[in-house]
Amino acid sequence: MIYELTYGGYRLGTFPTEAEAVRRAGYLPKGRYTVREWERDGEFSTFDPSTNKCYCFTNK
């Protein structure tokens, strides 16, 4: 699994753990961020909303 951090539709980076993605958002300006869990399938990464986590949070 890899975790993608986005802000306003822009990808800010991918991280090996969910905690690292949230921690990185702590160093960025205040706002609403999204973390998505992507699953590795061979060479490709896939996101399926029925099985992978996706949530938004506000950085204060």
Image (cartoon, rainbow, N blue to C red):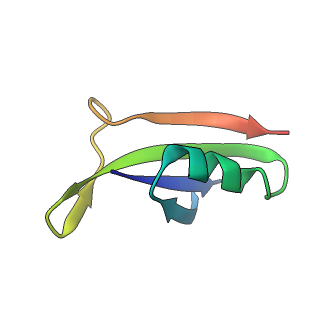
Residue 37, horizontal then vertical, whole percent? 40, 45
- Looking at the image, residue 4 sits to the left or right of residue 48; the answer is right
Q: Quadrant of the C terminus?
A: top right
State the residue lying farthest toward the left: 42
Residue 47, horizontal then vertical, whole percent? 30, 47
Total label count? Answer: 0
In-front residue for pair 15/57: 15
Residue 25, horizontal then vertical, whole percent? 71, 52
Taking the spot 67% from the left edge, 35% from the top edge, the residue there is 57
State the residue lying farthest toward the top: 50
Q: Which picture quadrant has residue 43?
A: bottom left
Q: Is residue 5 above or below residue 11?
A: above
- Looking at the image, residue 47 sits to the left or right of residue 44; the answer is right
- Looking at the image, residue 43 sits to the left or right of residue 59; the answer is left
Residue 34, horizontal then vertical, whole percent? 58, 44
Taking the spot 74% from the left edge, 36% from the top edge, the residue there is 58
Q: Is residue 57 above or below residue 41?
A: above
Taking the spot 46% from the left edge, 36% from the top edge, the residue there is 54
